[in-house]
Image (spheres, rainbow, N blue to C red):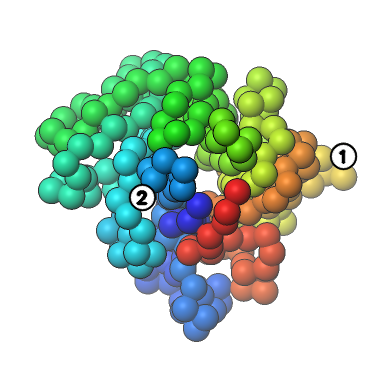
């Protein structure tokens, strides 16, 4: 598994930003581009891409990985979807899996949005997928689960190898209020990738502050849409994850915290 993109919607370094965190990233030649994860199945010689970052082209050139055999779209925000346009003239055929539930906010499911917004890409084969029902993709059992990322529907996922039992869980973009049924599916992973946009102490700068405080009053949600670092680690403990990497990280982390464990950076590789 390769972390192609570990950043939030602007990435780190952020364009036009000279904050200490962005400057430190430049000095250390580190990047957090927009979110995307590449999962290879060595048994079947296939690979799966979770989300299509706008940085698709640079990510694949940088990491020198093969093009995926299939893709998954977790939700329709641009930093997870708009890289799909890179499929033009690159793929001969590409199945793309996305949830089939109608979003009250848009009147369309994620699958319908992908199909309609990229109707001009004849190579795409959009496959509507029912949450909580495992789908066999690239030799893995993949299960989409609803999470909490208002106002749009968004999904996390569990990827399991039916032969080895290895398991990767991805929280998706979410607040700490991940439903219990979804937590049950995500539980006990060998590796958890958890959304951790900022440390909890920065919630004071959000217009509505933090939510889902722990017993010590520490916010586990930043505003409404994303977990804090502390919330992501609490989720990891709740799910009993063997290993955890924090992703979807913003450049708002203070420079002395921004590259500390367990915050991920682009290019990390893991074998499960």
Query: For the view shown, which residue lies furthest in the right direction?
Result: 216
Q: Position of residue 213 (x, y in %)?
A: 77, 39
- Circle 1 residues within 10 Å: few <14, some 14–19, many ≥20: few
**Could you say which disc has been placed on residue 145 in the image?**
none
- The residue lying at 25 percent from left, 37 percent from top is 94
- The residue lying at 57 percent from left, 56 percent from top is 270
Q: Position of residue 220 (x, y in %)?
A: 71, 43
Vertical position of residue 79 compared to residue 178: above or below: below
Q: Earlier in the sequence, mark 2 or mark 1?
A: 2
The answer to whether residue 203 of the structure is visible from this angle is no
Q: SS for tag 1?
A: loop
Q: Which residue is mark 2?
A: 53
Q: Position of residue 2 (x, y in %)?
A: 48, 56
Query: For the view shown, which residue lies furthest in the bottom direction?
Result: 27
Q: Which residue is mark 1?
A: 215
- The residue lying at 38 percent from left, 43 percent from top is 46
The answer to whether residue 187 of the structure is visible from this angle is yes
Q: Position of residue 98 (x, y in %)?
A: 38, 27
User: Can you tell which quarter of the image residue 48 is in?
Assistant: top left
Q: Nearer the viewer, residue 110 or 149?
A: 110
Vertical position of residue 77 compared to residue 178: above or below: below
User: Can you tell which quarter of the image residue 50 is in?
Assistant: top left
All told, the count of numbered labels is 2
Q: Real-space Cα distance between discs 2 and 1?
A: 36 Å
Q: Please state if 215 lies on the left or on the right of 172 as rendered.
A: right
Q: SS for tag 2?
A: loop
Q: Please state if 57 lies on the left or on the right of 184 as rendered.
A: left
Vertical position of residue 221 compared to residue 54: above or below: above
Q: Please state if 157 lies on the left or on the right of 111 as rendered.
A: right
Q: Nearer the viewer, residue 123 or 262?
A: 123
- Circle 2 residues within 10 Å: few <14, some 14–19, many ≥20: many
């Amino acid at each position: 598994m390769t972390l192609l993109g570990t950043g939030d919607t602007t990435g780190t370094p952020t364009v036009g930003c000279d904050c200490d965190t962005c400057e430190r990233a430049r000095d250390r030649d580190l990047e957090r581009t927009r979110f995307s994860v590449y999962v290879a199945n060595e048994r079947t010689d296939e690979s799966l891409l979770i989300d299509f970052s706008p940085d698709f082209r640079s990510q694949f050139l940088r990491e020198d990985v093969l093009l995926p055999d299939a893709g998954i779209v977790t939700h329709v925000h641009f930093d997870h979807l708009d890289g799909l346009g890179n499929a033009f003239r690159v793929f001969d055929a590409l199945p793309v899996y996305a949830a089939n539930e109608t979003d009250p906010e848009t009147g369309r499911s994620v699958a319908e949005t992908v199909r309609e917004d990229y109707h001009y890409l004849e190579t795409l084969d959009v496959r509507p997928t029912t949450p909580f029902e495992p789908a066999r993709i690239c030799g893995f059992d993949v299960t989409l689960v609803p999470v909490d990322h208002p106002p749009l529907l968004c999904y996390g996922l569990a990827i399991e190898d039916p032969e080895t039992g290895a398991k990767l869980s991805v929280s998706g973009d979410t607040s700490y209020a991940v439903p219990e049924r979804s937590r049950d599916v995500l539980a006990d992973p060998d590796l958890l990738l958890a959304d951790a946009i900022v440390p909890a102490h920065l919630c004071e700068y959000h217009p509505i502050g933090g939510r889902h405080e722990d017993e010590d009053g520490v916010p586990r949600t930043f505003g409404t849409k994303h977990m804090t670092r502390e919330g992501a680690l609490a989720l990891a403990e709740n799910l009993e994850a063997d290993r955890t990497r924090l992703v979807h990280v913003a450049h708002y982390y203070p420079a002395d915290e921004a590259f500390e464990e367990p915050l991920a950076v682009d290019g990390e590789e893991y074998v499960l």
